[in-house]
């Protein structure tokens, strides 16, 4: 197990190099001059060129990328934001807790809705509940988050005045963003849980458990669900990783100061180092989440644990 974890951590190195190269290339060839943005449109050209020399923006692509990689690896320095002049890591670390909290709440909502609904749909296949849940899943996958968030604000904040429309300070502020973010994931988890349960409950050992007189709740929860959880856990882990990097619209709609909103502002201002650092940070977190999911497999299925050994 330890060798497997170490090997996965070593595999992060080429992933980070690839991600950094792709993002750096995209930002390098994106139109716009960070020095001009920092000084303003009316700044003299001499001052703009002086600032470009100071920031190293006049160097060629490979010199700039090599300097960035060297500072990140040797000095653990992701650079300073062009706009705020603060270290990039500090900017991300200050906002990441809100993004992590939002993603965790979104996944919690998705799991609380998706897993029970998927189990009931599988055990009552083709029933009215099953058909209704599949319609809900289709609507949840198809509905854009920004549109759903605006509808929830109109209903619960403006019409009913039950919940605040922006902020992320108290539990009331967290309800609407968590529901908005978790609905689409809940639909995906519902479909995966249903299909996985349908495959498991048709196995011979499930019929044997029922033939021995086991209660249906024991058959479903102890025998079927545990063996159906592997693909469901995979989807939950992937959704958590996607929510960490894909909560941009939700953070913008509800005025949450998170990493997604920070990166949108950085892209608008051509703050290349901040965008680069944000993408790298999310890539590392996503990889760690996937590693955690793989380790969790070993505790759910002893056969997978034996493969790790």
Image (cartoon, rainbow, N blue to C red):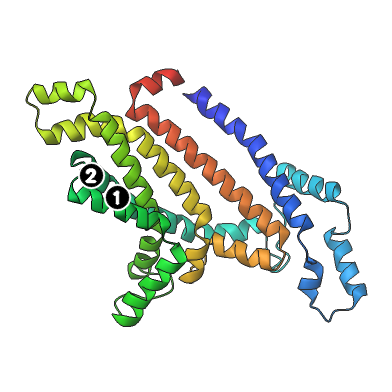
Give me the residue at 35% from left, 41% from top.
192
Q: Position of residue 106 (x, y in %)?
A: 39, 56
Q: Secondary structure at mark 2?
A: helix
Where does label 2 land, which residue? Answer: 121
The x, y position of residue 72, in whole percent, is 71, 46
C-alpha distance separating marks 1 and 2 = 8 Å
Is 286 left, or right, of 131 in this rendering?
Answer: right
Q: Are marks 1 and 2 in contact (CB under 8 Å)?
A: yes
Between residue 197 and residue 276, name the one nearer to us: 197
Q: Residue at x 84, y 50 (%)?
A: 61
Q: Position of residue 207 (x, y in %)?
A: 16, 24
**SS for callout 1:** helix
Determine whether, in the image, residue 259 is placed left or right of residue 155: right
Tell me what residue is drawn at x 38 percent, y 35 percent.
Answer: 231
Residue under label 1, please give it: 134
45 displayed left or right of 276: right
Give the percent coordinates (x, y) of residue 126.
21, 43
Q: Earlier in the sequence, mark 1 or mark 2?
A: 2
Q: Is residue 228 above or below residue 149?
A: above
- Write down the quadrant of residue 270 in the picture: bottom right
């Amino acid at each position: 197990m330890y060798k497997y974890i170490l090997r996965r951590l070593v595999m992060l190195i080429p992933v980070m190099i690839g991600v950094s190269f792709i993002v750096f290339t995209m930002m390098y060839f994106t139109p716009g001059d960070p020095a001009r943005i920092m000084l303003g449109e009316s700044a003299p050209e001499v001052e703009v060129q002086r600032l470009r020399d100071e920031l190293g923006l006049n160097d060629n692509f490979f010199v700039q990328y090599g300097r960035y990689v060297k500072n990140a690896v040797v000095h653990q320095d992701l650079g300073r934001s062009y706009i705020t002049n603060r270290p990039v890591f500090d900017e991300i670390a200050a906002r990441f807790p809100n993004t992590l909290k939002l993603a965790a709440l979104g996944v919690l909502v998705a799991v609380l809705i998706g897993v029970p609904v998927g189990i009931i749909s599988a055990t009552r296949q083709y029933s009215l509940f099953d058909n209704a849940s599949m319609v809900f899943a289709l609507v949840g996958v198809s509905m854009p988050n920004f549109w759903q968030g605006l509808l929830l604000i109109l209903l619960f904040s403006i019409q009913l005045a039950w919940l605040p429309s922006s902020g992320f300070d108290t539990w009331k502020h967290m309800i609407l963003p968590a529901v908005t973010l978790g609905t689409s994931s809940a639909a995906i988890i519902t479909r995966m849980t249903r299909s996985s349960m349908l495959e498991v409950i048709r196995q011979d050992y499930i019929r044997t458990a029922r033939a021995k007189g086991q209660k249906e709740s024991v058959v479903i929860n102890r025998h079927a669900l545990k063996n159906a959880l592997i693909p469901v856990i995979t989807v939950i882990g992937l959704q958590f990783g996607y929510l960490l990097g894909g909560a941009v619209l939700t953070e913008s709609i509800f005025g949450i100061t998170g990493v997604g909103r920070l990166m949108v502002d950085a892209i608008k201002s051509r703050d290349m180092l901040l965008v680069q650092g944000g993408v790298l940070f999310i890539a590392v977190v996503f990889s760690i989440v996937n590693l955690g999911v793989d380790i969790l497999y070993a505790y759910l299925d002893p056969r997978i644990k034996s493969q790790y050994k």
